[in-house]
């Protein structure tokens, strides 16, 4: 359950000294939970939406796919 609630920030498993950088799946998850993480980050400076220790393009791609899926696409429903 703790892994399901994982967010980017100082307590992130990716912040450990010898941790592998966050990849596609972490980016996807962080994108999916971004609406909730954003609200929490407004009140808690220790919570971040985006994982800084990432592997670059694949994390970014996963993050964008996750954000698109969680925030929706208003343009897709227009006729």
Image (cartoon, rainbow, N blue to C red):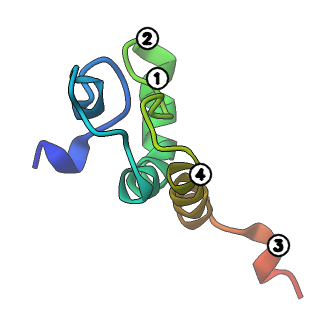
Q: Position of residue 18 (x, y in %)?
A: 21, 27
Q: CA distance from mark 2 to mark 4?
A: 26 Å
Mark 3 and mark 1 lie on one chain; the one further toward the N terminus is: 1
Q: CA distance from mark 3 to mark 1?
A: 27 Å
Location of residue 25 (image quadrant) = bottom left
User: Element type at marker 4?
Assistant: helix
Badge 3: how crowded within 10 Å, few (<14), some, or many (20+)? few
Q: CA distance from mark 2 to mark 3?
A: 33 Å
Q: Position of residue 71 (x, y in %)?
A: 60, 58
Dot 2 and dot 3 residues touching (CB under 8 Å): no
Residue wearing tag 4: 57
Badge 1: how crowded within 10 Å, few (<14), some, or many (20+)? some
User: What numbered label is drawn on residue 45?
Assistant: 2
Specify whether 18 is left or right of 27.
Answer: left
Residue wearing tag 1: 41
**Which residue of the protein is positioned furthest toward the right in this rendering?**
79
Mark 1 and mark 4 lie on one chain; the one further toward the N terminus is: 1
Seen at 48% across and 28% down, the residue is 52
Residue wearing tag 3: 75
């Amino acid at each position: 359950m703790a892994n399901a609630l994982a967010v980017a920030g100082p307590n992130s498993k990716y912040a450990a000294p010898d941790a592998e950088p966050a990849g596609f799946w972490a980016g996807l998850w962080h994108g999916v939970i971004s609406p909730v993480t954003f609200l929490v980050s407004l009140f808690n400076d220790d919570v971040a939406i985006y994982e800084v220790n990432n592997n670059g393009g694949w994390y970014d791609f996963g993050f964008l796919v996750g954000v698109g899926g969680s925030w929706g696409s208003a343009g897709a429903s227009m006729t």
